[in-house]
Each structure stands twice: as C-alpha cells, then as structure tokens.
Image (tube, rainbow, N blue to C red):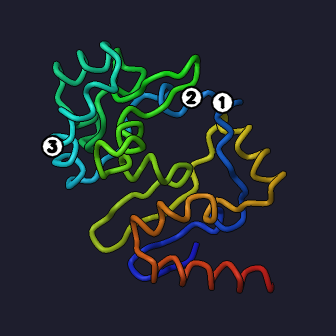
Amino acid sequence: MFQLGKTIVSEDILEKEFVCNLSACKGACCVDGDAGAPLLEEETKILETIYPKVKPFLRKEGIDAIEAQGTWVKGTDGDLETPLIDNKDCAYVIFDNKTALCGIEQAYNQGIIDWKKPVSCHLYPIRVKDFTEFAAVNYDKWDICSPACSLGKELEVPVYKFVKEALIRRFGQDWYTELEKVAEELKKQ
C-alpha cells in the first residue's frame, strides 16, 4: 500500500494484470454477486435525470425493477447502488446474445446521453471505498474474472493501465500521472 494524495492505493493495481475478456466471461460481473453497482451520491441524481433516455435500451425486467425500487437504492450496508432484478442482475443490464452489457453505456455509445456509466463499473476490477479523510483504492480479485487475468497476463497490461480512463475520471489526470511515476519506481526495484 502507498499513499497518493488523499488515497491509499494497493500495489496490486500496479502489479496484477487484467484485460476484460467479454467473450469468455459474458459480462458475469453485471449479473453475479449480491449487490448492485456502487454509486457516488452525485451519480444518483444523474441516474434520475437520464433514466427516461436510457429506458428504451433496457429489458422489461429492468424497467419493472427500476420502476418498483427507483433508479438507485440503498443497499443492506447503507451504501448507494443500482437496483437489482430479483436480487441478481443489475437492473440496467441488457443482453447481446448471452453477453451482459450495460444499457446506460449503450445509450452513451449511441450519443443519447453524455454519461458513460457508474464510475464503479468503469473502474472494475478496482474498487474504491471512501472514508472521511481518504479513499482506499483496491484491486478486487473475483474468480469470474480469471479469463481477464489470463488475457491481461498474455498482453502484459497492468490493472491501472487497463482502467486508465476510469481512474482519470475518478481522481483526475494529475493523480494518474503520479500513479504512473510510482509504477515506474516500483519497476526499478
């Protein structure tokens, strides 16, 4: 672990390798697990605003879940998150054949909205936990992502490079530049 500004960062994000392999995992991270995608407070307002534009991209089950629970929910631990369909799939999940995709991201890709998706989804496999004085930035190792770890190793892409755009989105370019410097220093050791 090392400190970077107001973050405590796990060295795993520099040392582990990862590249999503949707053809192998079929987007399992969007349909497995026991909670929705973590949300920042400002993202709850964004979801409320964009929902009418995203709704045409969603499945009936997702629309029903959102209209019953809201565009976001408080999880059992009190954290903000996306609602689920029957405590399984994220309500915003759509399918292309058997591959789970994000309905929000599909609306973004088509230029309907200008918000890609929750930053926690964009950051995955990195998870950020905000505390009063700092944020913890960790690598979340999940067995369903084994194909992504294999592909990352094959392509020699560390986690922090795979999620570069998302890290800049969450922490800014200056923070990411400092992270790159730490990564270079670690390589020299």
Residue at figure coordinates x 42%, y 23% from the top left = 89
Could you say which is closer to the camera, residue 95 or residue 153? Answer: 95
Residue furthest out toward the front: 111
The kind of secondary structure element at disc 1 is helix
Residue at figure coordinates x 43%, y 24% from the top left = 94
Quadrant of the image for the C terminus? bottom right
Does residue 76 sit above or below 8 in this rendering?
A: above
Does residue 42 sit above or below 160 in this rendering?
A: above
Residue furthest out toward the right: 154
Kindly identify the amino acid type of the residue bearing the numbered disc 3.
Thr
Number of residues whose C-alpha sits closer than 10 Å to that of mark 3, classed few (under 14), some (14–19) or many (20 or more): few
Q: Which mark is residue 49?
A: 3
User: Can you tell which quarter of the image residue 105 is in?
Assistant: top left
Residue at figure coordinates x 24%, y 50% from the top left = 43
Q: CA distance from mark 3 to mark 2?
A: 27 Å
**In the image, residue 140 lies at what x, y percent?**
57, 49
Q: Which residue is mark 2?
A: 28
Q: Which residue is mark 1?
A: 25
Q: CA distance from mark 2 to mark 1?
A: 6 Å
**In the image, residue 40 lies at what x, y percent?**
27, 53
Residue at figure coordinates x 34%, y 26% from the top left = 57
Q: CA distance from mark 3 to mark 1?
A: 31 Å
* First of labels 3, 1 by sequence position: 1
Does residue 89 sit above or below 186 in this rendering?
A: above
Kindly identify the amino acid type of the residue bearing the numbered disc 2.
Ala
Q: Left or right? Give the position of 165 relative to 72.
A: right
Kindly identify the amino acid type of the residue bearing the numbered disc 1.
Cys
Quadrant of the image for the N terminus? bottom right
* First of labels 3, 2 by sequence position: 2
Q: Are marks 3 and 1 in contact (CB under 8 Å)?
A: no
